[in-house]
Amino acid sequence: MPRRTLAESASVSGIGLHTGSSVTAVCRAAASGQGIVFRRTDLPGSPVIPARLSEVQSTERRTVLGQGETVVQTVEHLLAATAALQIDDLTIDLDGPEPPIGDGSFSPYLTALEHAGIVEQPGTPVVYRVTAPSEITEADSSYVVAPAKALRLTTTIEWPHPLIGRQTGSYDITARKFATELADARTFGFLREAEALRARGLALGAALESTLVLSDDGLVGGSLRWPDEFVRHKAGDILGDLALSGGRIQGHIVATKPSHQGNIALAQWLTRTGQRNGGVVMDIGRILDVIPHRYPFLLVDRIIEVEGTKRIVGIKNVTINEPFFQGHFPGHPIMPGVLIIEAMAQVGGMLLLGTIEDPEQKVVYFMSLDNVKFRRPVLPGDQLRCELEMLQNRGRTCRMKGVAYVDGQVVAEAEMMARVVDR
């Protein structure tokens, strides 16, 4: 299964829903493995903001990505269209802080991307496959996930309004069905909330041409495209938020009262628990070229994600054949906590070495550990997922935060100081 990008550029212009800014979004082909990134061409240096979960800054009424003032708002509509078309690599140039809202639906982006055409390119897309039924709850939102051969969304919403009430819809996510069942569903809001939203700097670009506006007893102007247009739009929002996983999802998701906050929590859970195929950044051969450790102290098998110099994710498969199980609680084998920290440190060392020239000639020494916590035991058969985030980098010295997971549950966490020295 190859990766996919655009054959030609696609452009959409208009007004941002929440900022009210006039902006043009230009979607361009990208190299295999880049993923989807936004580029703020209106800011000095044209900073890049990856469409990844680690970049989520806010989920109030929309999904916002970025750090500090370098942000892009309301990304879910554009990303839903890319997910429906299974586009893996894309650069989105924006000359403002928010993609245009168009008519409030996903259709303007789907139409533009389809018109530009899709091409395949070398490389394997990342796929997260749900392997067992589970339930995730975040605030008022709840999600049940189950194995499936492709992505299916069953969505239920409930509002005390005569046009909404309780609505449920179930949708197989393919390009064709997204186009016919979800793409034209528009975003909606309540007239009674408009003044309060604008006071918080939100919905500044909302208008009857781009939003379904609801009074207390009906629709302010226009007509619905489906009686259940509201739940269809919420299903599309889920798809757009799930695109921030950086991969394709295989599973049946049953969402009740979904929200952007809940969707992001679901996407985070899927990336940490789903069986991941493809997208290996460094296999064991490359790891051995860089890291000085060897058996029995090499505690990382794969690097599966690297986000510039900010974040890295590595995998350690824990088996009963590990030498430490012979003497560490042999009747009840448990991975030593210090080795969990060592596994995180080795993954973090790979991130730090990636910031310097000639990493094969350097070695990373860890200087201190702070806020170390062990949450649950790691047992034979577990897969340890180590996520390291760069908190501060001063040349050869850095501070990182590490979290280790098994099946989406935190097993250990720590803050680390490290330094690069000549080998």
Image: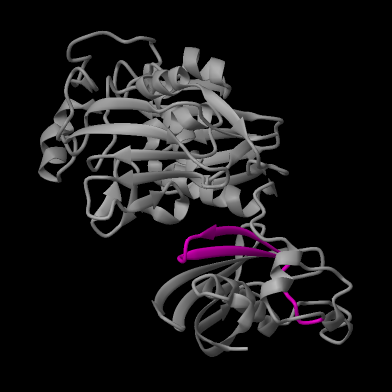
Q: Where 235 sits versus 313, above or below? A: above
Q: Where 58 sits versus 76, above or below? A: below
Q: Is residue 74 visible?
A: no
Q: Residue at x 70, y 32 (%)?
A: 148
Q: Quadrant of the N terminus?
A: top right
| Left or right position of 225 against 195 | right
Q: Residue at x 16, y 34 (%)?
A: 20
Q: Position of residue 376 (x, y in %)?
A: 65, 72
Q: Residue at x 55, y 20 (%)?
A: 175
> Is residue 22 or residue 288 the one in the foreground?
288
Residue 143 is one of the magenta-drawn residues: no
Q: Residue at x 77, y 70 (%)?
A: 379
> Is residue 127 or residue 190 the one in the foreground?
127
Residue 298 is one of the magenta-drawn residues: yes
Q: Quadrant of the C terminus?
A: bottom right
Residue 215: quarter of image: top left
Q: Is residue 130 visible?
A: yes
Q: Where 416 sits versus 313, above or below? A: below
Q: Position of residue 369 (x, y in %)?
A: 52, 87
Residue 68: quarter of image: bottom left
Magenta segment: 296-315
> Is residue 154 or residue 186 the one in the foreground?
186
Q: Position of residue 298 (x, y in %)?
A: 75, 77
Residue lying farthest to the bottom in this orientation: 367
Q: Position of residue 278 (x, y in %)?
A: 69, 46
